[in-house]
Image (cartoon, grey):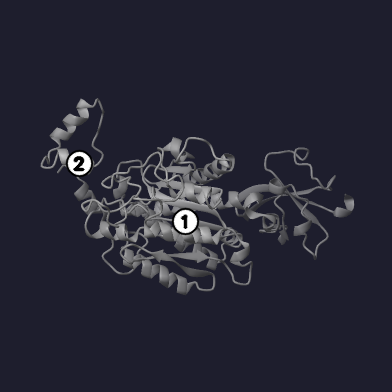
Amino acid sequence: MCKPGRAIASDHKRDNTCNSLWAKVKDLGLEASVMIEDIDAAAQAIQPSASDAMDLQTYNSYNTTVEWVKDLAEQYSDIAELVNIGTSYEGRELVGIRITGSKSKATSATKPGFWMDGGLHAREWITTATVSYMLNEALSKYAAGESEVVSIVDSMDLLFAPILNPDGYDYTWTDDRMWRKTRMPNKIAACPGTDPNRNWDYHWGEAGTSSVPCSDSYSGASAANQPEIIAVQEYIKDDGNFAGYINFHSYSQLWMSPWGYTSDKPADYDQQEAGSAAAVAALEAVHGTKYDYGPISTTIYPASGSSADYVYGTCGAIYSYGVELRDTGKDGFLLPADQITPSGEETWAAVKALAGVMMADEAVMGEAAEDDMCCSGACTVEGEEKYYSIDTIHNMCGECCMNPDDYRKYHLFEPGLTKADNDSPCGPLGFHTYDSTVTHGFGNIKMTLDLYDPDSV
């Protein structure tokens, strides 16, 4: 059956063969191909969970997801807290979890935050499933003491919000699987809803938006007039300490940074590109999935009033992104459930790599960056645990990481370089060289550890 999009449906109301639609495409001199032959059949094949119990390997309803989030907050109350972001037009809760880490360590007030959300566009189910997967990984791995996750969370709070458009998401389960927008009524009764990623109060209503309520890119009657967007904007702005932000979408496999409203490069373009490069490299290393990256406007299309632009432009979060998850069109919005776990695995690897870039950025971490990065881990040398400094990042001598019970200092060298290339700022060294694999916020990196007696300097 042919179901043309809403923008052209009026010309083809009763044509289920799409003959007139194909003729129109040909008359316009356009080329087209069928990506999904039968959308209804593809939607049925996904088979979302019919159970009220959360299953991370399949798609879950709004109610199931929200109850699971609340249960997680209780289960991990010593390291995380439930976040009530706001309420949707139809009265559904917008909830998330903020992972703060051990209460005995630095408080959230002294740490930057890293926000990740899904389900802003209702039909993009893989985003909710992927954010849910990463939330579970972050909590369980921190609780288990996994060094990389502990290092990240002790440096920054992680906030996960799986569903930011609950009314639209619920509607895709009950009425229209391909619904994109919110559900608040418009002046045209037959065309409710606003594109929630064109409604943010930053260069609202400019390039890449529509003023027509029936359009899937309708930006709303005014900036931030959707209750869901109002709630999220207020939370992020009032917090004032988010250094990282990712709004997940699907599909296209793109890792994108500001700007969306213009093709001009932002002031922090180099840092944003470095974050993107690290993320997509880590992502590809997991399952071989390839992502492109760059600014939104030049990588996919102009898009004004977007979340990534707002969080960067208004709230000052340098590492702000809009990410399009799997795939590149074969299944599109109807990604089979067997791809949830691999999507979660590779995206989580990307997020951890991006967190490592953020942790190394003194503009983001402030004075805490030097202390945290210097003493963020340990390596084993001749069976003994010795604290290390990350000299390849800050070029420090390592005093802050001296083991008080030992007379030696430690100096990490970048792999592949000579001693001359890595000459210590502390002066000549009495070298005793060992190869050691160290673990910190950037993952496992093979480096050469040179020990020296400070008395020889």
Residue 331 position, x and y percent, is 29, 45
Around disc 1, counting alpha carbons within 10 Å, would you say few (fewer than 14), some (14 to 19), or many (20 or more)?
many
CA gap, disc 1 and disc 2: 33 Å
User: Depth check: 219 or 285 in front?
Assistant: 219
Residue 133 position, x and y percent, is 42, 59
User: Depth check: 111 or 88 in front?
Assistant: 88
Name the residue that disc number 2 marks.
4
Q: Measuring 35% from the left and 58% from the top, which residue is drawn there?
A: 165
Tell me if residue 167 comes above or below residue 266 in the rendering: below
Residue 79 position, x and y percent, is 54, 70
Which numbered tag is attached to residue 8? none
Q: Measuring 43% from the left and 56% from the top, which residue is drawn there?
A: 117
Mark 1 residue element: strand
Q: Measuring 26% from the left and 39% from the top, which residue is drawn there?
A: 35
- 255 left or right of 271 in image: left
Mark 2 residue element: loop
- 304 left or right of 375 in image: left
User: Depth check: 84 or 48 in front?
Assistant: 84
Identify residue type, mark 1: Met
Tell me if residue 31 comes above or below residue 443 in the rendering: above
Q: Measuring 32% from the left and 44% from the top, which residue is drawn there?
A: 211
Image quadrant occupied by the N terminus: top left
Identify residue type, mark 2: Pro
Residue 349 seen in this snapshot: no
Tell me if residue 169 comes above or below residue 290 in the rendering: below
Residue 413 position, x and y percent, is 72, 45
Name the residue that disc number 1 marks.
116
- Within the image, what quadrant is residue 340 found in? bottom left
Residue 367 seen in this snapshot: yes
